[in-house]
Amino acid sequence: MQIAESSVFLWKSVEKLGSMQRQELAGKIGLDSCVQEINEAPERQVGFYRKYAAVAHRTLSRPLFQGFLVWMLTKENIEEGMISKIQIMMFPFRNEKGNWLAGRISRKGEICIYPKKKESCQKLMREFEKDNVYFYIKARAMAALIHELLHLRYASDENMVRRKTEKYFQIFIRKEYARDSKTRSILKMLFTAGAVTR
């Protein structure tokens, strides 16, 4: 099925889904307080990451996106019960390989969504307009959550998860956002060399 056809099918399917399912999934999304890290971090840094976390939380909790996730989980035969909680983390996270992550999932179904480093966002601000950077932050959070949810079915098949993440995100984004040249540039940056996982 082509993306355009999938998109039409998506929105018809989402309209049929009950709000109860969306609320159940949205109810699992929370902000991690990270009290110790907040106390140790510089005030300006804390302010930046608080705003970043708030944007990510609002974006991932939106009813339209929640409906999309319910549709995707149904399509991929992923049980919502496999997801224990979704945490919006306050600070960036580097794994044992030294890579900065956009998200990760535990064997217990606990998903963590991490922010982009402040320095990286500042670099984006020099290259793009504020609205485009804001779009990037929202897009990165949504793509990261889609990516981690797909790991519930495809486990360690990273290549499959990356391909499907881009496919599903493209379906959602076609309806939701205008595709101007800067938006296309940001989406390309988001999915180049698995950037959604960093």
Image: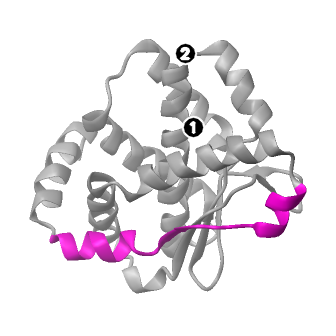
Q: Does the magenta stretch include residue 182?
A: no
Q: Does the magenta stretch include residue 30?
A: yes
The residue that appears at 75% across and 48% down in the rendered structure is 46
Residue count near mark 1 (Cα–Cα under 10 Å), binned few <14, some 14–19, many ≥20: some
- How much space separates mark 1 and mark 2, taking CA atoms? 20 Å
Q: Name the image quarter holding residue 106.
A: bottom right
Q: What residue would you read off at disc 2?
A: 129
| Residue type at tag 1 | Phe
Q: Is residue 168 visible?
A: yes
Asked which secondary structure carries label 2, the reply is loop
Please give the range of residues in magenta.
18-40
Question: Closest to the observer: 55 or 105?
Answer: 55
Residue count near mark 2 (Cα–Cα under 10 Å), binned few <14, some 14–19, many ≥20: few
The residue that appears at 48% across and 23% down in the rendered structure is 131
Asked which secondary structure carries label 1, the reply is helix
Residue 116 at x, y = what percent?
Answer: 69, 42
The answer to whether 175 is drawn above or below residue 150 in the figure is above
Q: What residue would you read off at disc 1?
A: 191
Proximity of marks 1 and 2: CB atoms separated by less than 8 Å: no
Q: Can residue 163 be seen in this view?
A: no
Number of numbered discs overlaid on the protein picture: 2
Q: Name the image quarter holding residue 31.
A: bottom right
Residue 54 at x, y = what percent?
Answer: 54, 50
Residue 180 at x, y = what percent?
Answer: 38, 16
Seen in the image, is 101 located left or right of residue 57? Answer: right
Seen in the image, is 27 located left or right of residue 114? Answer: left
Of the image marks 1 and 2, the number of the one nearer the N terminus: 2
Residue 22 at x, y = what percent?
Answer: 28, 69
The residue that appears at 51% across and 58% down in the rendered structure is 145
